[in-house]
Image: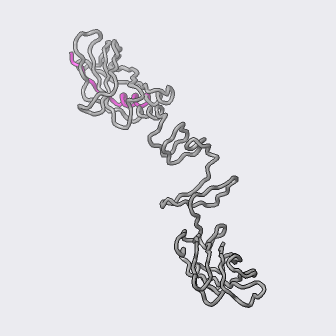
């Protein structure tokens, strides 16, 4: 007995439509399969035993999951139809190919393979979406119980086990530094590292400078540059002593556009005097004057501190 198998348009159309129906309605891995069988050149009209095997290659390759047997399946005018279910794990990222074997119902003879394997089209692979309780990669996950890596998560109840409402919305630069835009905190904010802000912006300290002002020991004792982030050496600032009690500090940015606070250290003098300080702007330079308060016209050396906002 010779079997001829012809996959006509009705096969492809029926296959696709039935698979779509199964995926949309049943929400399982099963799909309906329809084919046409010729026996000796004529449309078959009898019962036959069928076997269906799934492979990962058109030829050779390995079988995917178990063989499905359909004994005593009725064929009318050459057309047969059955439901196949290779399981949720069968349809992954690789192609799948269906091999069909047939023999007369109840025959002890071996099954006859019907021609080349048939590639499974895209629709059955949609069952992977049903099985994806954990998505390997989701560009846009509308609803995901667990998303290890989501390019766009429109609605998430929690991130990393922390309620989504407890996160601030931030922009991160590729350098690893943090850039926050219009961030409002209702509670406390703890920042482990240094904070930077452009000299033209407001809100954070731009410079902190502690100066030892005596002629022989003139130096910047400690400092921080809130524009560049420098916190060692002179922090990018230049200090000069023009005369006793008269100092100039080059900040590296326009001083006259910022807010300044200058204070003297009254503990450095053994004399019972109070010291004061004034300042004026000169481009990028901040000029500081230290004096004894009961003789403000006479400048004298003293330690002082400058804070620029």
Viewer-closest of 68 and 143: 143
Screen quadrant of the C terminus:
bottom right
Viewer-closest of 69 and 107: 69
* Residue 219 point in image, percent of width and height: 57, 79
Give the magenta range. Answer: 1-18
* Residue 171 point in image, percent of width and height: 56, 57
The quadrant in which residue 94 appears is top left
Q: Residue at x 38, y 35 (%)?
A: 92
What is the residue that sits farthest to the front in this orientation? 270
Is residue 168 depicted above or below 268 in this figure? above
* Residue 233 point in image, percent of width and height: 52, 74
Viewer-closest of 80 and 82: 82
Viewer-closest of 218 and 227: 218
Q: Residue at x 52, y 42 (%)?
A: 141
Is residue 193 depicted above or below 5 in this figure? below
Residue 5 magenta-highlighted: yes
Q: Residue at x 42, y 26 (%)?
A: 31
User: How is the model colour-coded?
Assistant: one colour
Counting every numbered tag in the picture gives 0
143 on left or right of 80: right
Is residue 50 depicted above or below 218 in this figure? above
* Residue 168 point in image, percent of width and height: 62, 52
292 on left or right of 16: right
Residue 68 magenta-highlighted: no
**Residue 193 appears in the rendering:** yes
């Amino acid at each position: 007995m010779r079997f001829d198998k012809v996959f006509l348009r009705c096969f492809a159309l029926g296959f696709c439509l039935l698979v779509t129906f199964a995926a949309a309605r049943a929400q399982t891995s099963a799909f309906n399969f329809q084919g046409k069988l010729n026996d000796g050149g004529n449309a078959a009209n009898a019962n036959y035993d069928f076997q269906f095997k799934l492979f990962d290659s058109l030829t050779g390759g390995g079988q995917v999951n178990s063989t499905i047997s359909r004994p005593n399946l009725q064929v009318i005018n050459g057309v047969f139809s059955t439901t196949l279910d290779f399981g949720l794990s069968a349809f992954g990222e690789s192609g799948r190919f269906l091999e069909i074997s047939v023999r007369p119902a109840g025959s002890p003879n071996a099954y006859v393979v019907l021609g080349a394997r048939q590639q499974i089209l895209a629709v059955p692979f949609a069952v992977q979406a049903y099985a994806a309780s954990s998505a390997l990669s989701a560009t846009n996950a509308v609803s995901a119980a667990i998303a290890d890596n989501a390019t766009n998560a429109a609605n998430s109840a929690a991130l990393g086990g922390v309620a989504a409402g407890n996160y601030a919305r931030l922009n991160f630069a590729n350098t690893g530094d943090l850039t926050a835009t219009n961030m409002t905190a209702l509670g406390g904010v703890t920042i482990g590292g240094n904070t930077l802000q452009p000299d033209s912006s407001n809100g954070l300290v731009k410079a902190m400078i502690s100066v030892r002002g005596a002629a022989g020991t003139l130096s910047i004792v400690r400092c921080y540059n809130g524009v560049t982030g420098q916190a060692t050496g002179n922090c990018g600032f230049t200090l000069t002593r023009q005369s006793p009690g008269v100092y100039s500090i080059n900040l590296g940015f326009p001083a006259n556009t910022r807010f300044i606070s200058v204070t003297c250290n009254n503990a450095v003098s053994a004399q019972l005097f109070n010291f004061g300080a004034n300042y004026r702007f000169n481009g990028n330079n901040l000029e500081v004057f230290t004096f004894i308060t009961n003789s403000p016209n006479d400048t004298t050396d003293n330690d002082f501190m400058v804070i620029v906002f």
